[in-house]
Image: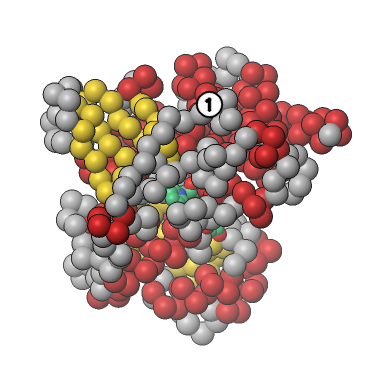
Amino acid sequence: MAETGKRRISILGSTGSIGVNTLDVVSQLGGRDAFDVVAITGNANVTLLAEQAIACGAALAVTADDAHYDALKSALSGTGIEVAAGRAALIEAGARPSDLVMAAIVGTAGLAPTLAAAERGADIALANKECLVSAGELFVRAVAEGGGRLIPVDSEHSAIFQSLEDDQHHAVERIVLTASGGPFRTWSREEMAGVTAEVARAHPNWSMGLKISIGSASMFNKALEIIEAKHLFNIRPDQIEVIVHPQSIIHSMVGYQDGSVIAQLGSPDMRTAIGYALTYPERPKLNVERLDFAKLARLDFEAPDEVRFPALRLARTALERGGAQGAIMNAAEEMAFHAFCAGRIGFLTMADVVEDVMDAMMGHAATTMDAVFAADAEARRVADEIIDKREMAA
Ligand code: NAD
Ligand code: MG
């Protein structure tokens, strides 16, 4: 805590969907009276980044891309806000002393700056699931050795975190991740084959960034969340269930050995999970929509279909194989997502690309962070080749 008694916070990825919601929560919780914003970071949206920096009084604003440095510098000239750009500056944003870091960059780009925050002992509010999918135990260990807390922001993992009872880890039988099923929950593979990114990004319940929206449609997001859960909660893969729950009201559940199931429910609004991570173990007062059970009337459940959505099977395969398969799956999925958005491959081909890359890279170890970064880079190279071939064959 700063001498002023305010919580010092940095927000990596402040211009994204989670970042914007985080700043909303910060402002609901008292804004500058309650928080010192040490650093915020963005990428191409320099106008928003500059507006945010001024509004929250950030000490440092970083754009990930050197090409945007001049624009950010001029937008913040005369404000006294420090400006920086590039990879090293992103890491510096994570490394600067603060009490809590919101990790809300999308993709593997978030790993190095979040790691810098973890190593110096900051509490990590983790939205960037890719950190855990890629670096798994190494990331968890870095947080533990740094001495900070790892608090999940992903709604499912926040729900599980909230439903886990102290000292009862031995009594946990299973965790049940809920999945909305996305926009193609009831579609056949034939129907999904020709969809564009514009169609696939339209999530029925949540408003989110592009990658996670596409990942919800393909269920790759849930696949990453299975791996995220394994590392966060130190639980066996066979104890992790996925259930499709189209209303997204139950955010996830924990089943205990006495037959009890404890769940966390709420409106599909990320600010609840963000607020909890920012003030844990306190529950903050938040202006979010309250559940009206009479209006809801019913909650539905159905088993996930791993034939129409092979991503779920691939997550289980990655966990069984271990080593760097999480990093490989994560990198391949990111590449496949970009290729799909660029119209280079079809919606269903994303899973084929990921599976091919995983199969081509068996036996890669992930015993050090360098090995994880190397596997990530190699998986991107292999994915690139496979995408080229698939594109030419189409
Ligand atoms: P987004 O695309 O809306 O925002 C991403 C942020 O990362 C932006 O600030 C962007 O500027 C920054 N960024 C993008 N590329 C970058 C790069 N190469 N280097 C540095 N910064 C870069 O994404 P989002 O939906 O807010 O998701 C962020 C993370 O939170 C993801 O890991 C996602 O899986 C996770 N998450 C999001 C939600 C949600 O509701 N949006 C829910 C659960 C988990
Ligand atoms: Mg989620």
Asked if residue 207 can be seen in this view, the reply is yes
Q: Is residue 205 above or below residue 3?
A: above
Horizontal relation, residue 27 to residue 303: left or right: left
Which element type, helix, strand or loop, lies under badge 1?
A: loop
Q: Residue at x 49, y 33 (%)?
A: 223
Residue 85 locus on image (x, y percent)? 58, 62
Q: Quadrant of residue 293?
A: bottom left
Q: Provide the residue designation for mark 1.
A: 306
Horizontal relation, residue 82 to residue 359: left or right: left
The crowding category of the residue bearing disc 1, from other C-alpha atoms within 10 Å (few below 14, some 14 to 19, many at least 20), is: few
In front of the other: 382 or 17:
17
Residue 161 locus on image (x, y percent)? 26, 41
Horizontal relation, residue 225 to residue 352: left or right: left
Q: Quadrant of residue 285?
A: bottom left
In front of the other: 131 or 266:
266
Horizontal relation, residue 380 to residue 240: left or right: right
In front of the other: 281 or 392:
392
Q: Is residue 206 above or below residue 310?
A: below
Residue 156 locus on image (x, y percent)? 35, 42
Which colouring convention does the figure follow?
secondary structure
Q: Amino acid at mark 1?
A: Glu
**Residue that extends furthest to the bottom in the rendered view of this protein:** 78
Asked if residue 107 can be seen in this view, the reply is no
